[in-house]
Amino acid sequence: MIIVMDHQANDAHIEAVVARLARAGFQIHLSQGVERTIIGAIGDKTQLKNISLEAIPGVEKVVPVLQPYKLASRAFHEEGTLIRVGGLKIGGDTIHVIAGPCAVESRNQLLEAAKIVKEAGATMLRGGAFKPRTSPYSFQGLEEEGLKLLAEAREATGLLIVTEVMDVRTLPMVAEYADILQIGARNMQNYFLLREVARVDKPVLLKRAPSATFEEWLMAAEYIMAGGNYKVILCERGIRSYENYTRNTLDLSAIPVIKHLSHLPVLVDPSHATGKWRFVPAMAKAAIAAGADGLLIEVHPNPPEALCDGPQSLNPDNFSSLMVDLKQLAPALGRKLS
Amino acid sequence: MIIVMDHQANDAHIEAVVARLARAGFQIHLSQGVERTIIGAIGDKTQLKNISLEAIPGVEKVVPVLQPYKLASRAFHEEGTLIRVGGLKIGGDTIHVIAGPCAVESRNQLLEAAKIVKEAGATMLRGGAFKPRTSPYSFQGLEEEGLKLLAEAREATGLLIVTEVMDVRTLPMVAEYADILQIGARNMQNYFLLREVARVDKPVLLKRAPSATFEEWLMAAEYIMAGGNYKVILCERGIRSYENYTRNTLDLSAIPVIKHLSHLPVLVDPSHATGKWRFVPAMAKAAIAAGADGLLIEVHPNPPEALCDGPQSLNPDNFSSLMVDLKQLAPALGRKLS
Amino acid sequence: MIIVMDHQANDAHIEAVVARLARAGFQIHLSQGVERTIIGAIGDKTQLKNISLEAIPGVEKVVPVLQPYKLASRAFHEEGTLIRVGGLKIGGDTIHVIAGPCAVESRNQLLEAAKIVKEAGATMLRGGAFKPRTSPYSFQGLEEEGLKLLAEAREATGLLIVTEVMDVRTLPMVAEYADILQIGARNMQNYFLLREVARVDKPVLLKRAPSATFEEWLMAAEYIMAGGNYKVILCERGIRSYENYTRNTLDLSAIPVIKHLSHLPVLVDPSHATGKWRFVPAMAKAAIAAGADGLLIEVHPNPPEALCDGPQSLNPDNFSSLMVDLKQLAPALGRKLS
Amino acid sequence: MIIVMDHQANDAHIEAVVARLARAGFQIHLSQGVERTIIGAIGDKTQLKNISLEAIPGVEKVVPVLQPYKLASRAFHEEGTLIRVGGLKIGGDTIHVIAGPCAVESRNQLLEAAKIVKEAGATMLRGGAFKPRTSPYSFQGLEEEGLKLLAEAREATGLLIVTEVMDVRTLPMVAEYADILQIGARNMQNYFLLREVARVDKPVLLKRAPSATFEEWLMAAEYIMAGGNYKVILCERGIRSYENYTRNTLDLSAIPVIKHLSHLPVLVDPSHATGKWRFVPAMAKAAIAAGADGLLIEVHPNPPEALCDGPQSLNPDNFSSLMVDLKQLAPALGRKLS
C-alpha cells in the first residue's frame, strides 16, 4: 500500500497518516521528495479494508500494491484450474459448447432444442426456468416445471444442464436439477446469492456484470471461493459501452487478461454480447481463437417464435454450420472440440 | 411499433412479418418506399413482448413507439407524485436531506451521527445494517443489531430511518425497523427482491444501477409499482463512465429527464457519485439547482475511522456548512429546505 | 514514480529495472516485501517519458506519483487564473454567459440572435463560421462571410465574439475576427492546431473531448500553455456514456475537480451536453451552483428553422426566462451575473 | 423518416410538423393512434439535414429509416471492395500484416525493425514520423527525416509503407513517401484533414476514434469517399470503456458489423487496443477468426528502449511466434496469410 500525499500536505498531516497506519500494525517507509511525500505501508492488508486513509487531510491518493482477491488469483494457483462435472473437464484442451434456448418455453421446444444441439456437438444444454426480464409484463419462465423439462432433456440426450439461479429461496430446487448453476450478469454482485451458492457442491458459471471491471468480477468469484466452493467458471458476455448497435460490447480481451490474473476457466457468450444472431458465429470463432475454454450460445428451433431473445438466437442450420467451422478451427489452435 | 425492413428484403420476408403481426392481433400499415419497406403495427403492445420480429429474415430493425413502462410514466399520472412518510412529503417544494454514515458501526457512532445530522437540519437518517461490499473480507454490517440501533436513533432524534434491504429473507426484519426501504444500485435489477418490496407498505428508495439507462431504471420502478407499491422514490447516484478520477459520473441530467418522463420524485446521492468528500458540497448544490427533491449524503463523526466509505463521507463541520449553503440556495430556486 | 514488480519477478528482472532507471539518472529506493518488490524512482520525470519500463519482464505496473501536467496544475499557480478579454474578467465572482446560434446562417439570423442574447444579459456571442458536421452532406458554415457577420454583430451590440477555429490554415483569419478562439471537442487532441493557437495572443476556449479524462483535458491545455499562451478557458460539454437519451452525459463534477487540480477557469455548455432544449435550463442552473465560471448556451431566433442543432437551441423566450432565473440564483451562491 | 409526437401533442403541433415537412418537399403519411400520432415523411432525406424537427413543440422523437452514409454502405456496393496497392490486394482472401514500431526513432532502429517484420512475413511496415503524443514534453517524431528513413526501409525490404498524416500542411510531404496514409484515431473527425486526403490518390487507413460509433466511423469514411477517394480501409483499434486494465476495449464485433453495413475492408490493431504486449497475440488471432482483413501490430527491436508505446510492442521473438500461429490459423478459416 502506497500513500501519496498532496503538494500542500504538512508534517501534521503526514504524522496523522503514519500514526493511523502504525495503530493498525503496519510498518512504515517514509520518502520525502521535493514535490511529494510518499508513505509505504507493509503489513496485513486486510486491516486496511477497515480504515479510510483518503479521508485524512493531505492524502492525495492511496495506491494498492496487491490485487484484492487471493483465492481467485493466479498467484494462489499457478496451474489453470480444471473443473470436472459429469465426466467432462472444463478448463483444459477441450472446448465445450453449451447451447440451447434463452428460456424453457414448452416440452416440445426444449426437447427439440436439446436434440438439435446434441446432434451438432454441444455437450451441455442451457435454458432458463426463471427469467430476469427487464419488463414485469414479459414472460417470466416456467419455474419448477421448466427445471423438470431440463431434467427430462438431460435424460433424453445425455447433455448436462446449465440453468440460472436467481433467488436464494429457489436455490435448493434449482441445485437439485442443474449440473452447473448459472449466476446471471445482473446478479454478479448479489452477495447474498453468492454466499449461498458458495455452500452448494456444484460448479458455478459466473457471468460478468455488464459494467464490472475484471477486478470486480474476480472479487465476485472470490466471494464464492471464500465461502468454500472453488468450482467457479467465469463467463464474459459483453459489457456496456456507448456503442448500442450491438446489445453489448464483447470484451474478448477478458480471455487473455483473466488467464493472466487468475487460474479459473473462462467461457464466452457471444449471443448476449451481440444481441443479433447474424454476428454470433464470427464472435464465437474469435472467442475460441482468443483462448476461451468454451462457449455459451443461444439456439432456438424457431427463433421468430421465441418468447425471449429470439433476435440473438441461432436457428438449427446456423448453429450446425458454426459447429462445423469450430471443429475445423480448434486443431489449428492446438485445441479440440469435445 | 414500426418495423424497418432491410434493403434486400423481398416480398416473402415482408409477408412473413405481416402474417406474424396479424396472428398476434395487430393492425398493419404497409409503406413500400423506393429504398425501404416500413411496416407499422397498431395493437396490444404487450403481445409484442413475446414475439421476436428481429429474428425474421429481412427485418433490419424494430422501433418501439411507446416507452415500455406505464405506471411510472408521466402520461399515466400528469402531476408529480407526493410521497408521504412519517409526516413528511417527498416530491413537493420542500427539499429533504437524508444523511448519516455508510454503515452502522456502533451505538456511539450512530447516535453521534444522528445528533449531528439532526442539528444541521436533516430530516432522515441513513445507515446500512447489511452492507454489499465488493470484498468478502470487508466489514459486512451489524445486521439486526444495526437495525435496532437505527430504531434507537430514531427514538432519540425524531429522524426517519432509511436503510438498505438486500435479501428477500431479511426483508420482513428490515421492513419492521425502516421508514423507507432502500434498494441499492447493485440490486436495481434483482427482480425477486423488487417483487417482494412491491408487497410491503413502505416507500422504496430505488437507486439507479451504475450502468442502467433511464428506461431500465423506470422499468425497475415499474416492477415495484406493477406489484402494488406505488411509493417509489428514485435516486441518482452516479453512473459508470470511462472517467475514474471520480468514483462514478454523477448524471444530474437524470433530474430533468426523469421529471419529464415520470411523475416519481428523484433524489441525488453525491457521496457515492464522486467518492471524494471534497467534491460532495458542489454536487449537492448542483443537484438542488437542477431540481432534485432531496439529497442522500454520507456523514460520519470521524471519517478516517469509518469502516466503510470514509473517503466520501463529510465530517460534521463540512456537513453543517453545506446545510447552511443549501438553506440560502433553496429560496433562490423557489424551494425550501425542511 | 513507483514500479510494482509481479509475483514471479526474479532478481534479474529487478536488476534490469534498476539499471535502466539508474542509466536515466534516477535515484532508486528498493523495497522487497514478502509478496512483491517495489521500486521507487526519484529524479527528472521528463526522462521517464522516453523509456518504457512496462516492457521489461517482471514489471507489473508503473504508478506515477505526480500528474503529468505542470503549467495547468494548481500547484503551479495556487490562485485561480483570471482571464481578461475586452474589459471582462473570466474566472472571478462574475458569471459570464456566452450565447448565440450553433452556426452563423445569415445576416438577419445572426443580428437578431445577437440582439436577443444581449438584451437578456449575455456578454458574449457565440456562432460558428466553420462547422464540423458529422455528415459531409450537411451545412458546413459560411466561412469568412460568417466571421464578417460576427464582427458586424459585435459592432452592433458590444458583445464579444467566441467562434471555433478548426484548421491551421484559417486560424489567422479566425483570429482576426474573434475575441476568444474556440477549440471544439473533436479537436481537443489535434496537437498541430493546439500548437498554433498557442502562438496567438487571444484567449482559447478549450472544450473537453467527448471521451477525454480530466488528465487528458488538462494535458491539452498544457500543450497550449507550453507553447506560450496561458489564457486557456476550459469548457465541459458532456462526455460519451452508454446513456443516449441525452446527446452526451454532462459531467458537472468536472467543475469542482478541475478547480481542485488546476487554476484555469471552467465554463459549461449544457446545450451540447443534453442535446434537448427542454433540459438546458436545469443543467445551466446546476452548472452555476456547482461553481462554473460561466455558460455557453445555444440560442436561435427560431429553432425549428435552424440549419444546425435546432433541437438543443433555446428560443428567445426560454433564454430570457433562464437568464432571469440565473440572476436570482447567483447572489444566493455569492456570485453575480455580469 | 418517422416522427413520433408526444402524448400531449395537439392538432396545432401536428400541423406545424406536417407544414414544415411539406415545405421541404416531403410526402406525408399521418397515422393517428390512440396514444400517439406518428408522421411518416418520404422524400429527399438530404433536405432533412437542414431542418430541426425536434425543435417543434409536440415532437417526441425523430427516427431515421435509412443510415446517413451512402457511398460507404453495403447497399451502394454489394461486393466487398478490394483495395490494390503496390501489387497487394486488401479485402480479399489474403490476410495482410502491417507491422513495425510506433515511431521512427533512428535509422538503425527502423531498418532493424523492417528486417524483422519482413522476415516474419509482414507485407507492410508501419512507423510514425509525426507523433500525436498526449504530453507536449514527449518525443514528437523525426518528421521528414522519419519519412526518408521509411522510404529507405521500403527500398531495402520491399515492404510497403503505412504512416500517419496529422496535418494538412504536411500532407503533400507524407503522401510523397507513404504507400498508405493513416488517419489516426484522434483525427477521425478532423474534417478538414479528411477533405484533403480525399483529394490524394492513395489508400487511406482510417482508424476508429476511441468513442466513435460504427455510424460515425462510416460517416468519416463517407467524407473521404464523397471527396473522391474511394480507397478507404477501416481499422478497429479499441474503444474507450470503463475498463482500464487494458488501454482500450477491443471491439471485435466491429468486424462482422462493418462487413454487414459496408463494403470496405477492416483491419484490427490489437496493440493500441490492449496496451500490453502480453495480450496482443490472443487478440490478433481472435481478430483473424472474426474475419478481419489484416492486422496492424507494433513491433520494436527492443521494446524497453522504445521512445513510444514500448509496453504494447512485441519483441522480435514474440512477433515471429505470432506469425507462425497465424500461418497455421488462416487455412482453417479458409484464408491465407500473404
Image (spheres, coloured by chain):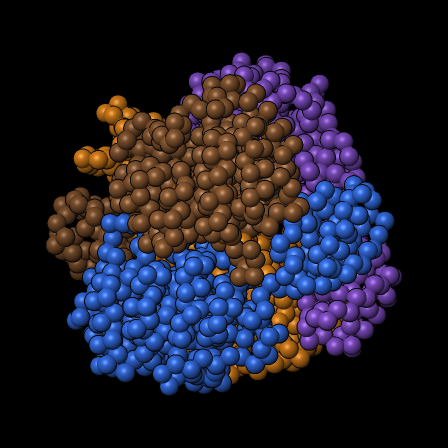
Chain colours: A orange, B purple, C brown, D blue
Q: Nearer the viewer, residue D233 or A11?
A: D233
Task: Give the x, y percent position of residue C111.
Answer: 55, 38
Quadrant housing residue A314: bottom right
Left/right placement of residue D127 relative to residue A272 reads left
Residue drawn at 71 percent across, 69 percent down: B36
Residue drawn at 50 percent across, 31 percent down: C157
Quadrant housing residue D259: bottom right
Task: Give the x, y percent position of residue B323.
Answer: 52, 19
Residue drawn at 36 percent across, 30 percent down: C84
Task: Give the x, y percent position of residue D120.
Answer: 29, 80
Left/right placement of residue C244 relative to residue D310 reads right
* Vertical order, A151 against A38 (above or below): below
Left/right placement of residue B215 relative to residue D173 reads right
Quadrant housing residue A158: bottom right
Task: Give the x, y percent position of residue B282.
Answer: 48, 28
- Look at the image and tell me whether residue B224 can be seen: no
Residue drawn at 47 percent across, 84 percent down: D93
- Look at the image and tell me whether residue D81 can be seen: yes
